[in-house]
Image: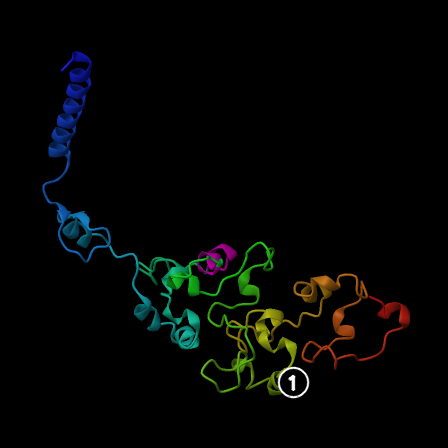
Amino acid sequence: MSGHIWRPLLVVLALVAVLIAVRQIYVPDDFGVHARGYTYGWYRSGSVIDWRWMPLQYQGKESCAECHQKQVAEIRDMPHASIQCENCHGPALDHPSDPPKLAIDTSRGLCLRCHARLPYPSSARGGLRGIDPATHHPDRECVECHPPHHPILDDVRAAGSAQGDLNASCRPCHQKQVDDIVGMPHQIIYCERCHGPKGDHPTDPPKLTIDRTRSLCLTCHDNKTRHNAGRPCVTCHDPHKSSLQFLQFLPSSGEASQ
């Protein structure tokens, strides 16, 4: 066999020998396939012991239920019930001592991790309700319409159903307002969306804000910016009634034009 064939062959054999030698030196003896329960198959068996000494970052939703019974009860019959609290609130670690309060991530980006529509028909990921972020209210945060503990805004739930009345906690003191809005377009909106977070209301704050500004209405009805410009929407439109029932007076012909 001529030299121009032997020389490349010897180079290849030398490289293989070097790779085998390097592998023998750098690859641990316990590296291999030990138990088929691991997703990737290959791992170092000693790493199992190493990981046992790592401090736990996530505590699980069971630990949250001890102090946050109300939130756990709210989400129990919702689609998000299967999600660990820490997926959205971050690792609890030594909470409530460190940190005393977990972050509440209300960013659009967090929601889109699961709810950006992806064409995966053969997996469970494709079964999640998804949106096209470029066309579905691209300039707004998802939580403005979809509170994470009550994200469903399909047809209105019947009072007393498993999913319950969205504004049931307001009913004991504001029965008229809650009843007025039943069957109206705004029934799918949380009271707090317009009145602000209730916190420990009625003790703190004793009274919630009643926002009558035009800008609040235009956050959803942005196609009506030129409709009676400069006039508060609530002059003609009672937020608790439907669009066909809440005219308090008939504006003049000039003001009524679109």
Q: Is residue 157 left or right of residue 80?
A: right
Which sits in the foreground, 138 or 255?
Answer: 138
Q: Residue at position x 65%, y 80% from top? A: 184
Q: Quadrant of residue 132?
A: bottom right
Q: Which quarter shows the N terminus?
A: top left
Kind of element beneath mark 1: helix
**Is residue 101 visible to the viewer in this orientation of the structure?**
no
Q: Is residue 101 left or right of residue 174?
A: left
Which residues are the magenta region?
105-115
Q: Quadrant of residue 198?
A: bottom right
Amino acid type of the residue tagged 1 in the rendering: Asp
Q: Residue at position x 72%, y 62% from top? A: 223
Q: Residue at position x 34%, y 72% from top? A: 65
Residue highlighted by disc 1: 180
Q: Dot 1, crowdedness within 10 Å: few (<14), some or many (≥20)?
A: some
x and y, in percent, of residue 130 in the image: 49, 62
Question: Taken as a whole, is the magenta stretch helix, strand or loop?
Answer: helix
x and y, in percent, of residue 237 in the image: 75, 75
